[in-house]
Structures are given as structure tokens and as C-alpha cells.
Image (tube, rainbow, N blue to C red):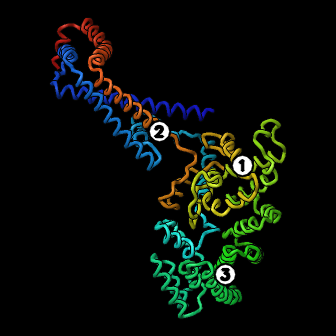
Amino acid sequence: MAEAAAGFLEQLKSCFLWSWTYLWTVWFFIVLFLVYILRVPLRINDNLSTVSMFLNTLTPKFYVALTGTSSLISGLILIFEWWYFRKYGTSFIEQVSVSHLRPLLGGVDNNSSNNSNSSNGDSDSNRQSVSECKVWRNPLNLFRGAEYNRYTWVTGREPLTYYDMNLSAQDHQTFFTCDSDHLRPADAIMQKAWRERNPQARISAAHEALEINECATAYILLAEEEATTIAEAEKLFKQALKAGDGCYRRSQQLQHHGSQYEAQHRRDTNVLVYIKRRLAMCARRLGRTREAAKMMRDLMKEFPLLSMFNIHENLLEALLELQAYADVQAVLAKYDDISLPKSATICYTAALLKARAVSDKFSPEAASRRGLSTAEMNAVEAIHRAVEFNPHVPKYLLEMKSLILPPEHILKRGDSEAIAYAFFHLAHWKRVEGALNLLHCTWEGTFRMIPYPLEKGHLFYPYPICTETADRELLPSFHEVSVYPKKELPFFILFTAGLCSFTAMLALLTHQFPELMGVFAKAFLSTLFAPVNFVMDKVESILPSSLWHQLTRI
């Protein structure tokens, strides 16, 4: 409560500061206008008479010009502030005030006022936030040639960003190359091919490597980028499996002969696992779901330590397609553990299974009358848990936002992960009767349980603040990135919008009713200058006339 009160007072102070700064800036320019146009002497004894004479000679056109100019200036500031907020997510004027003006005015930065106890907690949460903002390889990523490129041919849009493809190139260099590749001509060519930016140059290099030797990584590149159908990609992956399995067996026998052979065996292991996983995904795409599930199970048993590929998420999706919910629950029992990293697939699949038990008979009206049963409460809590982990998913599952092709990399708890999950799992939610209805009735209740501001989480760590920036890099420009928490409009945008509307209304009224508004304007200005006249009379009565004469001459 104390932190929230301090934050509110700091925001109130900033709003008050900028309100007065803006008003005094406007009055400053008005005074400059008077000095320039009327050549008003800056001597106090002449100033009052000149101002009173000026007020008596003002015409309605002057008030129309003054209010219209103020409205125009406020409108331009409003447009700039709105553009800056839409692009960078913050107010330009407030950012300048925090960075430059507040230190000059004696303000204290909130980040530097933490005590030692809170700093330890903040450092822990920051470390967790950095780890959660790590970009991960999408375990369900599509095939670049057979799926992403076909989308480009049909729509003319690029579904992948340069940042996403650059991360994929780094992954390929990490998994498919090693330091001893230069000793083998085909692997040396492929080592250069993975660094190529031009797709045609990569494909040409892969064909060149195959002319020298049966190179598994060359087949992988052709299957990913040159094959235009899933059937073609599967055929190339089978050839890659034949070549990669032989390399794996040879390096397995030599892995203990030195670090060079060990690195080569590690590379061959990554290549073999990647090929088998992509073959299982080809089978899943071609409708051979049971075969795909069996291949994934065998792969997980053969290489249980390679959790970096997240093969269990592919298995969960295949089992949901088979409607083998008992097997799905068995996989979740192993991987939905407190010590293991979570994902949207884990959390929302667990919520789907619990919703499946009650969703077909769930009615919000009946639940409001009799209360929630134990099973319904468990389902609602599972949905709240999933929504807290990734709040972007429900809008895609409920089709409140349009889906796009998922990227090759995702950010956990971000919009990219939500797209990747909903793209493959929306059909599974639709298949369970009433599941989407239960989600629609309960998902927004999650936000009443999460502390606000989001310094603390409820079931997970606080939601990281870096997701929006990373998602904008991963997702194409034609997609509107989902932002959580929803950013409120800065005070200065609201203030400028109100000022612009008020001055525009004054200009319109002055133009329509010039005499009446002239009376109001003269009365307002007379009232405004009344305190100044009162102070000046008091000063003249207190100070000696000679001293006052010398001051006015200055």
C-alpha cells in the first residue's frame, strides 16, 4: 500500500508539474505577443495603463484568433504525443520530464530510492524477468519452403521477420556445425551455407555439398527451404536420416578419443534428433497421427536428456488430435512440474483437460445460483493459472483476434507464444464441447487476482516488461501485437486533448457570438488581473515614491 501510495503521489506531482508548466508556457508566449505587437513598455507604472487600454480596444476577431491559435498549437502537440505514444509506448513530454527536468527540480528517481531489502528482491525478480524474456525455438515451427513460402506466394506478405530468420541461422550454426567441419569438404560447404542470407545461395551450396558426399545437413536444408510440399520434405528428411544415422554411429564409437570427436558426436546427435523430430512432424501434417505420436515417444526414450527441443509439446498436440486424453494427462504429470519451465502448451492443456470434465454441463446462470462445484472450481483455477502465465492466448482461442502463421521463435508468456499455441490447439478446444464457453466466462477473472501494479505475481513470477519489444521483433509488421498490461494513455495526452477541445470550443463560440464572448473575455481578464492590481496598489502604498520611481526606471 505504501509503495502504491508513493507511486500515486509521484504521478500526481508529475501531472501537476506539467499542467503548470504548460499553462505558464502559454502565458509566456501571450506576453511575448503583447510585447512584440503593442511594444508594451516593461515599466510597471506604464504597464497597467497600457494593458487596460489594450483590453478596451480588443475586438472579437482577436479572441477568435487567440483561441484558434491555442487550439491549433494544442492539436499539434496532441498529434505528436499520440504518435510518439503509439510508436514507443510512452509520453515524450513525461519522458523528458523524468530524464531531464525532475533532477533539476529536486525530484528523486524511484529506482534509486529502494532500500537494501527491496533491492535484493528486485534483483531476484530482474534476473527471473531476463530469463523469461529469453527467445526460444518454436517446437511446432512450420516448414519454410512448404508452408511459409507458399503463404508468401499467395498473399505477397512475408510471415517471417529478419530477426526471426537470423535467430534460426544462429540455431543452425549451433546445432549443425562443429570445429572439425573444415576437415570434411561437404561439411565445410554447409558451414558456410548456414551463414548465407540469400536462400538461393544456401540451396545451391546444399546441392554442391551433395555432389561431394551424402551430407545429412544438406538434405535438411533442402527439406526445409527447397521442398514445396510436405511430402517432398518428408522424402528428403528420410534421405537425411539415412546419412545422419551412419554419421551418428561412427562418431558414437570415436567420441571418447578426444574433445574433437566428442564435439563431432554432439553435433551428429543434434542432427539425428532434429531429423527424427521433423519426420514425426511430417507424418503429423500428412494425417498419420498415430505414427507421429509413436515416433515422438521413441525419440524421447532414446534421447531423454535433450529437452531443448521440447519434443513433449509436439507429442501433446498429436495426442490431443487422437483424443487420447489419458495419455495427455500422463505426459502432463511428468512435465507439468514445479521444478520444470512452463509453457503455454503445458498450462493451457492442463486447463483444457480439467475443463473437459465439466464444460459440457457448465452454465454461468446455474453456477451463479448454486455456486461452483469442486470440479468446476478446479477447472476455473486451471484457466486462471493458464491466463496468468500467458494472458494473450484467450483472445486467439475465442477468435477475438485474427491468427497469423506462427514465427520460428517464440517468447514465453508473450504474444508470439500465444499465436504459436492457438494456431495448433484451437481445433482441440473447439472439439471439447463447452470448453470455449467456460473459457469465455472465466478468463477475465484472472486479472482481479493478480496484484496491480504487477510488481508481484500470483502463481508465477511477475509478468516481464520486455515482451512487447521482443514480440515486435519476432512478429511481422502487419500483425497488431497484443500488449499486456494494457497501457493507459499518459496524462499529458488527455490534458492536451482537453485543452485543444476547450480552446476550439471557445473559438467557435467567439465566432458565433462575438459581443457576448467579448464581454465574458473582458470580465475574465479583469478578474485575472485584479490580484495583480491589488498587489501593485499595496506595493505603491508601502514603498517610498522615490524608490518606486527608481525601480520603475530600471
User: Is residue 314 positioned above or below 96 on the image?
Assistant: below
Name the side, left or right, on which 416 lies relative to 382.
left
Callout 3: SS: helix
- Which residue is under mark 3? 272
* Disc 1/disc 3 C-alpha distance (Å): 43 Å
Where in the figure is residue 328, as x and y percent of width and height?
A: 78, 64
Callout 1: SS: helix
Mark drawn on residue 437: 1
Three-letter amino acid code of the residue under disc 2 = Pro
| Residue at the (58%, 56%) spot, across then down | 415
Foreground residue among 104 and 45 = 45
- Asked if the residues shown at circle 2 and circle 3 are in contact, with their CB atoms under 8 angstroms apart, the answer is no
Where in the figure is residue 284, as x and y percent of width and height?
A: 69, 73
Three-letter amino acid code of the residue under disc 1 = Asn
- Which residue is under mark 2? 490
Q: Which of marks 2 and 3 is nearer the N terminus?
A: 3
